[in-house]
Image (cartoon, rainbow, N blue to C red):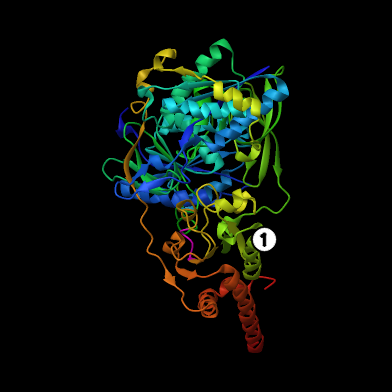
């Protein structure tokens, strides 16, 4: 394997309901930095059916090139069909690095592709860097449940691959009109070559909880004592117009469902305000919320590690503090509205 | 009659593991070894399918000799047979080398009794990757189905099965040919307490233990550290956060200070309804 043949940074671009999810745009931002440091090109690889219009935003968010597979066989994501396209493209154009979102699709595809190439694959990366001279990817990730960070290298194989967590990297500002080179590929692949069939896609009609999109989150932990005690979190969240988050203990105790869980085995969130009530602050929780704008912690225990990871801390009994907060917040907001009305 | 293989791993309980602050290494003595919680659901699903369609459940794991304990746990859940592959030459394997070794074990198990279905947990709590399952599927050249949260049916005469794969906002119904490999979500089932006869059986159960030499057609270069393209170059403790400003005083004073912090972000609240 001659490493000199391998050039460029690629980002696998996901597509959902005719749009590019933010994780792929974040990866273009991260990939741009790696490509610039290495003095090479950034490319997006887009696989789907009737997705050509999505190449425009890929360029506008930082790519120099887009490799496009647009064929009916790619109507729905399937490991085997997407894998074959990506393997063919990678073997033909030989990128140095391929990044995927650490989403269910990204992980599924990356795992299959890495096995076939074969090459090394680092999962759930949260920090990326590249050695300018050698092109060696430095992919760092939390390990052992977030207790430590580890930097993973793949020295002997190319391309180097990593899946990258959502909401960790920053997308570039969109640059309207920015364009690049579109490379349209087709693969000779028949339906009979693929051993799985998507029979139906069911969108859950109930309003799905997406706490990762909330501006404000009020999260509760085991310190609230019981499912009844956890109601306090819901009341404050209602008052603030916030989403409800929870620690892993609370979800395992059944006080609230898993989509609300913040942290390593839950959701990573970056709201503008994060209020943690009765959460001790295990590292597994912290990794899921540490990039929030303002972190406020309320806990009875002055030694709780959460106080190391917050911007504002209150050592107090939540059952005493929070009801006062709810009442005074309502009062303050009413005053605001009254003064607003007067100005008009 | 289905022959189902569940792939499992014994892991340190990362929830209670303590770090040695001086060396940044795990103090393994503080963490009991347990069956990876996700894998319990894989074994449970295999057992349920056996109850539904008849057949046999085998579990396979790679690890040090004490990993037979994790196999016993699977026998408690209801597995019929357990296979441990253990050898110094497996040590230091990353996900690629692990999928290679486990595949070799499954091929060997398959020799006497062809495997129809392989089930893995979503991921392990110590590696957190979820990469080994799909890796095994590729090596055996069978379809990988990840994020599975329901098995609808297995149609052995037709050689197909139908599952639900979890999506961010719902699920998809997927049909696959058999054999195939599933990585299952925790939500696929609940693992009940083991019935007493299973516990008795587990206590007496002797796992099959294989070394590299017991497996067929093994390329030694693909095993363990040597067969692993990824290496850990550096391990460090995440930077310790600085800690924030403590809001002191009596509860009333604390609330007032907190309120001024929140109202500093007034724009977040004004457009909301119901406040």
Q: Using the rendered image of the protein, determine whether residue B181 is visible from the camera's viewpoint.
A: no
Give the residue at x 61% y 61%: A243
Residue placed furthest toward the top: B112
User: Picture coordinates of residue B228 (x, y %)?
Assistant: 37, 29
Q: Which of A192 and B211 is in front in this view?
A: B211
User: Picture coordinates of residue B104 (x, y %)?
Assistant: 47, 19
User: Picture coordinates of residue A60 (x, y %)?
Assistant: 48, 53
Residue with the mark numbered 1: A228
Q: What chain is tagged by disc 1?
A: A
Q: Using the rendered image of the protein, determine whether residue B92 is visible from the camera's viewpoint.
A: yes
Q: Label 1: how many residues lie within 10 Å, few (<14), some (14-19) or many (20+)? A: few
* Displayed quadrant of residue B92: top left
Q: Is the magenta stretch mostly helix, strand or loop?
A: loop
User: Picture coordinates of residue A260 (x, y %)?
Assistant: 60, 54
Dividing the image into 4 quarters, which one contains the C terminus of chain A?
A: bottom right
Tell whether position A72 is magenta.
no
> Image height check: is B247 above or below B240?
below
Q: Nearer the viewer, residue A58 or B57?
A: B57
Magenta region: A290-294
Q: Nearer the viewer, residue B225 or B273?
A: B225
Give the residue at x 36% y 33%: A158
Q: Is mark 1 on a helix, strand or loop?
A: helix
């Amino acid at each position: 394997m001659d490493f000199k043949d391998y050039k460029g940074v690629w980002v696998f671009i996901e597509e959902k309901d005719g749009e590019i999810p933010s994780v792929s745009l974040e990866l273009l931002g991260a990939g741009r930095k790696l490509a610039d440091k290495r003095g090479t090109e950034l490319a997006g690889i887009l696989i789907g059916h009737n997705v050509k219009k999505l190449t425009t935003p890929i360029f506008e968010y930082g790519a120099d090139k887009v490799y496009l597979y647009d064929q009916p066989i790619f109507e729905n994501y399937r490991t085997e069909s997407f894998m074959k396209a990506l393997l063919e493209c990678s073997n033909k154009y030989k990128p140095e690095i391929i990044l995927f979102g650490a989403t269910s699709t990204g992980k599924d595809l990356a795992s299959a592709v890495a096995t076939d190439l074969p090459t090394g694959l680092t999962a759930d990366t949260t920090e990326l860097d590249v050695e300018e001279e050698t092109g060696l990817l430095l992919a760092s990730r939390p390990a052992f449940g977030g207790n430590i960070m580890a930097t993973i290298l793949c020295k002997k194989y190319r391309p180097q691959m990593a899946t990258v967590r959502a909401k960790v990297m920053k997308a570039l500002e969109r640059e309207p009109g920015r364009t690049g080179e579109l490379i349209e590929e087709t693969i000779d692949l028949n339906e009979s070559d693929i051993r799985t069939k998507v029979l139906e896609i069911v969108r859950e009609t109930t309003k799905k909880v997406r706490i990762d999109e909330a501006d404000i989150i009020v999260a509760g932990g085991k310190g609230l004592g019981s499912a009844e005690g956890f109601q306090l979190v819901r009341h404050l969240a209602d008052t603030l117009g916030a989403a409800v988050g929870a620690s892993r203990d609370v979800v395992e105790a059944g006080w609230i469902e898993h989509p609300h869980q913040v942290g390593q085995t839950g959701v990573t969130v970056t709201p503008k305000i994060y209020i943690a009530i009765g959460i001790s602050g295990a590292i597994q929780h912290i990794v899921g919320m540490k990039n929030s704008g303002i972190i406020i912690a309320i806990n009875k225990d002055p030694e709780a590690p959460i106080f190391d990871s917050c911007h504002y801390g209150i050592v107090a009994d939540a059952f005493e503090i929070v009801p006062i907060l709810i009442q005074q917040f309502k009062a303050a907001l009413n005053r605001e509205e009254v003064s607003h009305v007067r100005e008009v | 009659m289905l022959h189902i293989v569940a792939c499992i791993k014994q892991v340190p309980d990362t929830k209670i593991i303590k770090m040695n602050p001086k060396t940044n290494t795990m103090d393994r003595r503080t963490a009991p070894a347990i069956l990876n919680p996700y894998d319990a659901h894989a074994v449970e699903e295999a057992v349920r399918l056996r109850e539904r369609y008849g057949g046999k459940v085998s579990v396979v794991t790679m690890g040090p000799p004490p990993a037979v304990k994790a196999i016993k746990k699977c026998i408690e859940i209801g597995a019929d047979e357990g296979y441990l592959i253990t050898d110094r030459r497996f040590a230091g394997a990353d996900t690629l080398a692990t999928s290679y070794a486990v595949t070799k074990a499954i091929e060997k198990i398959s020799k006497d009794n062809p495997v129809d279905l392989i089930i893995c947990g979503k991921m392990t709590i110590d590696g957190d990757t979820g990469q080994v399952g799909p890796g095994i599927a590729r090596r055996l050249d069978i379809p990988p189905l990840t994020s599975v949260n329901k098995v609808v049916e297995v149609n052995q005469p037709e050689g197909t099965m139908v599952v639900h794969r979890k999506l961010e906002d719902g699920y998809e119904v997927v049909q696959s040919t058999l054999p195939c490999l599933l990585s299952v979500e925790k939500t696929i089932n609940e693992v009940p307490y083991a019935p007493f006869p299973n516990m008795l059986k587990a206590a007496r159960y002797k796992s099959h233990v294989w070394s590299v030499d017991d497996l067929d057609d093994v390329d030694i270069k693909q095993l363990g550290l040597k067969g692993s393209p990824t290496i850990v170059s550096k391990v460090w403790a995440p930077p310790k956060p600085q800690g924030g400003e403590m809001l002191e005083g009596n509860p009333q004073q604390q609330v007032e200070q907190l309120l001024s912090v929140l109202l500093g972000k007034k724009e977040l609240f004004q457009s909301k309804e119901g406040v």
